[in-house]
Amino acid sequence: MDERERLVTPPGAPRLRWLARLVFLWALVILARLVDLQISHHAHYQRLAKAQHEKQYTIQPLRGTILDRTGQPLAISVPAQSVCVNPVKIRNQEVAAGLLAPVLGLDREALRDKLLEAARRRRGFLWVKRKVSAEESERLRSYKLEGVEFREESARVYPKGLVAAHVVGTLGFSDRGGDTEVGTAGIEQALEIELRGSSGRVEVLADSMQRRIESLVSREPVPGANIGLTIDERIQFAADRELKKAVEQGLCETGSIVVMDPRSGDILAMANFPTFDPNVQARDAGELAARANLALFAPFEPGSVFKIITMAAALETTGLRPSTPIYCGGGVIRLFGQTIHDTKAHGTLTMAEVLARSSNIGAIQVGLRVGERNLLRYIRAFGFGRTCGLPLAGEASGMVRELAAWGKSSIGYVAMGHEISTTSAQLAQAVSVIANGGLLMRPRVVAWRQVPGRRRELSEPVTLRRVLKPETSIVLRQMMEGVVLHGTGKRARLAGYSSGGKTGSAQIFDRKTGRYTHRYNASFAGFAPVQNPQVVVVVTLHGASQFGGAVAAPLFREVAGAALRVLGVRRDLIGVEPPDNEPVDVDDLAIADRGVNPPVPVLPAPAVDWARPGGPEVVAGPRVPDFSGKSLRLVLAESVELGMQVDVLGTGLARAQFPAAGTMLAAGERVRVVFAR
Amino acid sequence: MATLATWFDRLVGSGAGPETASAGRRGGGRGGIRTAAGVDGDGNSPYRLRAYPNDDVCFWVKRIDNSRVTSPGDPRARMAFWRFATAASLALLLVVGVLLPKSYWLLAGYQVHSLERERESLIEERKLLEAEEARLLSPERLEELARYQELVDPPPDKVIHLSTPEEDTAALRTAGR
């Protein structure tokens, strides 16, 4: 250090230099640490930071709402909470089970075992109960239990309860696993993909407190479409109510009512009994069986109600007119060795009277004039023998045999509604042809679909074909009005409205005894008003104790009256009231007890055997095995092995099956298996 | 530096000059004898303080008029100053430009997500209310209420259908023909 430097250097300079050196060293350490963090272990720390701050979540789309034609929600998704636990975090499973079980209504021992098992296996997650009520959730939250968590989910609510339950359907957990519920019946099942929508994906940037700062939707969720049904909840309720009343009065065991707008094919109501509350899970096979949509699933021999098809074919293909006299043989006819009796010993009746009084002999005579080929052509043209095309799973096609399979006397039996099977929906479709001027409309239950934020897609009515000439349908309507005015359907007369229809009563065949029972498939198919029909109503009562004119016709009156009132149809009969206590001959039995050698029915439809689809009469096996408790895969494997076809309804394990285990299947007959969790 | 004591000595000293007074004080300081009158034989008071070194030196402020003095310009210093000012401004701008938007973004992010949560909860609430409304309007419940209030469905002859505007127009047209 020279003199000059010594003179200018302040006295504290060396200490400052040391400080600077220390700071420099400190900076070097920091730099080294930074290099370590940012370069050497960059990937590791980046991964950790991402895990802490960047998260990906699935955005569950909101399931679409199902509404009736007036916009009333029949099924709606609402937020709900589910309870889950981390069994590893729970210190005392016994205590936890003791706290959780009473609040959630679960079995304490079963829950404790589940918790212990999960803890033993070191599982970090276990559902305790899904979709708990707000009250349950609140109580559990107040306990502040360690390891108990709540997850936000959505629950499907059916605010109208039983109304249109069979059409709307239910949800259940898929047997493929996963936490998402899927439709297991009705529209919920048929339009599952549209209702569910598709999930989205969002990347979230959160702070250390997991408060969200920024989110980037990498895949937009598509919300489920709202579905507007053609069902009118008020008409549906009236149909449900009347059906329930009929069963409670002991008039029948089960039944179904279909109300249709003949002009568009819109199903305004589809009621079945027994019915169910879709808000409640089925607990046993009986409750599962109640979920069957009898109007679609249960084909039955229509009996005399089918005579309108014979008459329609006659009006179109022969020179027969309503006033044409038909000889009814004094109540007995021998047809290729078969003796068929009439309900009453009629002499000569006009064709209109044959229909009004439901003369079997008269119908056979008309059928013979029409001929097998023409009759079969018209039966098919009216839509029998194939499904209606409704978007509801499990619809039966009914049974119409090919001409080659007809016996010699089949023309007689088919003409009066035997050796053939149909569903209530098919009958409603056929009666609509007569009511709307001759057009076969495709029944529809979905009026529109709308994805939120997009335009509403309307389902247009579909005309399948012209079946009858307009003038034929007018004549037929008048003939059917005659049934109500002075025939077997007098109890179907409406106050203020004209109406037409046809009664039907078919004895139920008991497979066990091989004989016909004294229970009937009582039915009434009609429309109102006659001039410009606005509604078609088909009432089918299984296991009825009386004839169709006695039990089904009054139901038609009530339901049609309610429907016309709801639809605001002006009355066309002013000052004309249906007479009270008028003596009514309702005997329209197609195959009477007094008949000799009645044919073995092609398809008897006992009340409990609702799921038997159509098929030839040959009993060819195989014997139906017991599917209960088996998985879908096992059921399918077994059915393939036995060479039988299975209709699958729902998901989970097999809970109910039709026909029952041990029954011999007719050739081509299918087994319907109901699955549930 | 002259202290107050020095000035005091100068002003009230017993006729002696400042030097004498100082000397007296210094003598007292060296252990002068205190008397009852408080003044020893040398005239030194025991209450006087000892003088500090250079106590008798006085400084006077010299007024210098430097109003006409001008400092010569130093371009290097000015440059350094401007360089520092620019750097500081840039640094400040950088801090403000980087941190402020980031802060706004952060706060806005919190706000957006808070609003989103609120929106979701409102949608959920609306769904619950819709379900409740639908339940309250169910035909079964309405019928029960109607029964309770003794209301019945009107028979068809009691229902009067009001004509729609379209029908009125059609009727007028027909009448006009």
Image (cartoon, coloured by chain):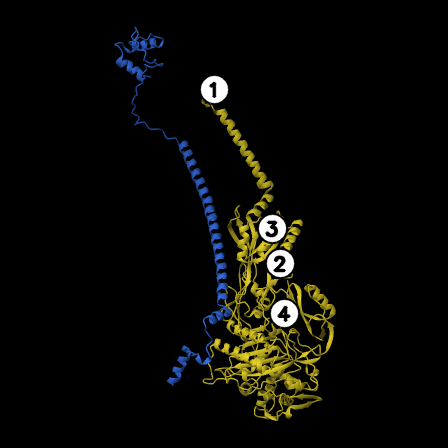
Q: Which residue is mark 1?
A: A3
Name the tint of chain A in the rendering.
yellow
Q: How many angstroms separate mark 2 from mark 1 (CA)?
A: 88 Å
Q: How many angstroms separate mark 2 from mark 3 (CA)?
A: 26 Å
* Residue A438 appears anywhere in the view: no
Identify residue type, mark 3: Ala
Res A652 quadrant in image = bottom right
Given the image, what chain letter belongs to the residue carrying mark 3? A
- Say left or right for A665 vs A326: right
Q: Front-most of B46 and A507?
A: A507
Under circle 2, the secondary element is: loop
Residue A656 picture location, percent across and down: 66, 68
Q: Which residue is mark 3?
A: A96
Residue B130 - label: none
Q: How many angstroms separate mark 4 from mark 1 (CA)?
A: 113 Å
Q: Viewer-nearest of labels 2 and 4? A: 4
Sequence-first tag of 2 and 4: 2
For the image shown, how many numbered marks are present on the structure?
4
Given the image, what chain letter belongs to the residue carrying mark 1? A
Given the image, what chain letter belongs to the residue carrying mark 4? A
B46 in relation to A595, above or below: above
Q: Which residue is mark 2?
A: A178
Q: For the residues tagged 4 and 1, is the chain the same?
A: yes
Residue A267 picture location, percent across and down: 55, 74
Q: How many angstroms separate mark 3 from mark 1 (CA)?
A: 87 Å
Q: Front-most of B125 and A248?
A: A248
Residue A289 - label: 4
